Amino acid sequence: MKLRKGLVVLTILMLVAGLVLGGCGQKKPEAPKEPEKTVIRFAHWRGEDKAAFESIIKKFEAENPTIKVEQSIEGSEKHDTKLLAEFQAKNGPDVFAVMPGARFANVVKGGWFLDISGEKFLDVVKPHLRLPGQDGGKQYAVPYQLVFNDPVYNKGIFEKYKLEPPKDWKGFLALCETLKKNGITPIIFDSEIGPGQFMNPMLMNNMPSDDALVKVQKGELKLTEDWFVTTLKQFKELNDKGYFQKDVLGTKKAGAAALFAQEKGAMLAQGSYMMASNKQANPNLKQGLLAPITVSADKMKYEGIHTATFMIAINKDSKNVEAAKKFMAFLFKPEIAAEYANATGQMLTISGVQYKTEELMEQAKWLEKKTLFQPRYMITVSEVEKAIVNSIMDVIGGMAPEKAALKAQQEVDRVIKK
């Protein structure tokens, strides 16, 4: 009997041991693998927007956990050069920003744009603001920013001397003279981007037609004609009368902005895109926008210049088109666009965006004004654009307006005959 009980106990112990040993040998369940992520690259030139885009990308990735977005940022000139080189090598970014005009035309010519006509996210951009991104009836890029390329002025200085934005050329010269007599530089003008910016409001009411520079490019109008020579003469008049700061040719964009933020000049001949950084440099600065009206008040056609720019597009050769479209659609959501606008101080082309900063609300007033799309960006041949911009610097450097116009026209003729 004792022997039977011993066998039973032994059997039970063996079973328990077997279960324990068997349990130790079982493999632990594997943790679920994270889904493989699609990585897309977003290339642009606005280093100052890096933090704003980082915040937006985090939100996008939270909504789309299988997509990762990498920012690729270069300066504007290097961005253009690198972009074309990468497209040619078939390793371009999936989503990218491009400027209107000649730069847009270069990408169209290369056939690197994905046709995004009919995409739902386009609906938040008014049709006339989409035009700079169209070619041959197809939508290749969508402007994100709405810029007013008119000089920024210091409201505090204007209020001190009881000055108002003038309505004609005579009034503009009188305004400059008053500022100069009070020891204030009327216009801060740089040689880096200034000529390409300031030429637009200076030309807008002088041109015989809105597309005059396109006609120059086609050989239908000449830069030696009165309308262009008159514009160069007006640049010379501003320079000869000392309405620009000293050493315009040696002043770069950043230096000009610093002088304006330090309140060493009343106007900055750049554009609305500078207002946020000016305010950051000098929180006490109160700013407005004004354009020089180069004709008499009764002949004024336009009050200023606008540009729909920072155009966003998708690479036709991208292997991640659907992910790229999702990211682009996310950027054009009004609530996301509002986050970008208020973080960067940039007005946008997107309807329904709520602006909060003083500078953006000032720019919003210009939505109701009669403005012309930037004439420089109507030029699609880089050499023609360069010839026109250089003629302004030639005049500032001392060349006679007629001679500078002839030099520019000869360069245009050379390009047209190619």
Image (cartoon, rainbow, N blue to C red):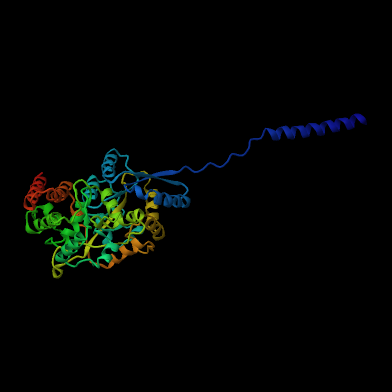
- Judged left or right of residue 418, residue 273 is right
> Which residue lies most toward the top here?
3
Say left or right for 252 vs 333. Answer: left
Give how far across and how far down residue 100 sits, in percent: 24, 52
Q: Taking 275 as reference, is 201 left or right? A: left
Instruction: Specify the quadrant of the image occupied by residue 30.
Output: top right
Nearest the viewer among 306 and 259 is 259
Residue drawn at 45 percent across, 52 percent down: 59
342 relative to 247 in the view: left or right: right
Pinpoint residue 52: horizontal percent, then vertical percent.
40, 52
The answer to whether residue 295 is above or below residue 116 is: below
Residue reaching furthest to the bottom = 298
Residue 88 visible to an observer of this rendering: yes
Q: Looking at the figure, which quarter contains the C terminus?
A: top left
Location of residue 8 with respect to 185 vertically, above or below: above
Residue 142 in sight: no
Tally the numbered discs.
0
Query: At 34% across and 53% down in the image, what residue appears?
Result: 281
Task: Please state which of residues 359 and 141 is positioned toward the viewer in this rendering.
Answer: 359
- For the residue pair 85 and 263, the one nearer the viewer reads as 263
State the residue lying farthest toward the front. Answer: 182
Q: Quadrant of the N terminus?
A: top right
Q: Position of residue 241 (x, y in %)?
A: 14, 56
**Residue 156: x %, y % from top left:** 30, 63
Furthest residue toward right: 1
Name the one closer to the observer, 221 or 261: 261
Q: Quadrant of residue 117?
A: bottom left
